[in-house]
Image (spheres, grey):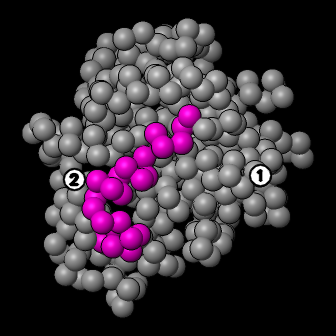
Amino acid sequence: MPDSPPDFPPYYPPLLLRSGLVHTLYTALIHGRNWQTLTSITQPPYREHIFQGAQNVPIAAWIAAPKAPISPGTVIATYGITGELTNQWYLQIFGRKAWDQGYGVILFDWRGHGKTGQLSPTLTSDGLDEGGDFVAIAEQAAGLGCPPPYWFVGYSLGGQLALWGSYRGEIRDNPDIAGAAVICPSLDSLRSLKYLVKTPWGRAVERAITKQLKILADNLYTHHPQALDLGAIQRANSIWEFDQELVIPRLGFNSVPEYYQASSPFRFLDQLQRPVYILYAADDPLFDPSIIPDLQQVCHHNPALHLHLTQYGGHVGYLSDHREQKRWGDLDGWWAWNRVLAWFSQQLSQG
């Protein structure tokens, strides 16, 4: 499958990583252990801050103001379905690279996760409310030394949240919100979850994610025992059951499919008017390949959407060797983050 649009050159990972499954596993299991040795950029001087998110939900974040008086703006970013700021190394790499290029950086624990989960029992909504959290953070950021324009960033399920943030920002008509950039975003949870559990490998991934979701729910119960039903947590033995037992009752949905349909970014992608960069791999083993033609179609009809569809990359992989780094003019192997930051620079130069 060729890359699109044609102004993006193709991406070639090392030969051994030209399998989406292998690329995904290698990135998570190998680079996840030694990532700090693969970057020379130091961690920004983060300070902790609690934002007031949508519906006044407290959102815990790390903030690093720009290191120079003149800044290209601020990135506001979060991670995927599980984890927390302290262990989300892929997000921390982006924070380092963005800050090194002069951006203000705000990384946050989204609802139910990390310190945000300690502060509030509010559970996840796959973007329906987290989109408002992105906007709320942007509206409070300038007072903390992080100037506009604001770019919303995420990967995997965090990419879905960032897309919702862009949508909510346009509804609110906030001129300081420039747009979004997302890597391997979740776009259709219903199709992808059904696709994932068709294979033994996919079922193993689903079980691993479910285990982490139950840990998340147990942590919430530890801090907010009156707000969660321990029996519901014990019954949630799959991603579907987690949403069935814990998420949709609070949000007022009658079924999990209804919830997934309501939270899908396909609902609004054709309406976005501010620029959005979507980096998506055709060999992503976690998402249903049937999503790709739908994504291509909506991006073809909406010039605000900049789809960079690659043949290779896996799920949030996109590692590059020295040959590929030289071809693209990159200083390191974090190919996806280099493309995001290069795209920001391009958008800012176009005014």
- Judging by the rendered image, the residue that carries numbered circle 2 is 208
Tell me the residue at 36%/34% (across/down): 315
In the image, is residue 161 above or below residue 307? below
In the image, is residue 143 above or below residue 93? below
| Residue 34 position within the rendered picture, expressed as x and y whole percent measured from the top left | 40, 41
Looking at the figure, which quarter contains the C terminus? top right
Tell me the residue at 36%/57% (across/down): 259
Mark 1, other Cα within 10 Å: few <14 / some 14–19 / many ≥20: some
> Is residue 194 visible to the viewer in this orientation of the structure?
yes
| Residue 320 position within the rendered picture, expressed as x and y whole percent measured from the top left | 45, 21
The secondary structure that most of the magenta stretch takes on is helix
For the magenta stretch, what is the residue range?
246-270
Tell me the residue at 30%/66% (across/down): 254
> 258 or 66: which is nearer to us?
258
Q: Residue lying furthest right in this view?
A: 69
Corner quadrant of residue 49: bottom right
Q: Which is more N-terminal, label 1 or label 2?
A: 1
Determine which of the numbered discs, if any, sits on residue 144 in the image. none
| Residue 106 position within the rendered picture, expressed as x and y whole percent measured from the top left | 65, 55
Tell me the residue at 62%/76% (across/down): 56
Horizontal placement of 299 versus 176: left or right? left
Amino acid under disc 2: Ala
Q: Is residue 208 magenta?
A: no
Q: Is residue 267 magenta?
A: yes
- Judging by the rendered image, the residue that carries numbered circle 1 is 174
Q: Secondary structure at mark 1?
A: loop
Q: CA distance from mark 2 to mark 1?
A: 39 Å
Horizontal placement of 288 versus 162: left or right? left
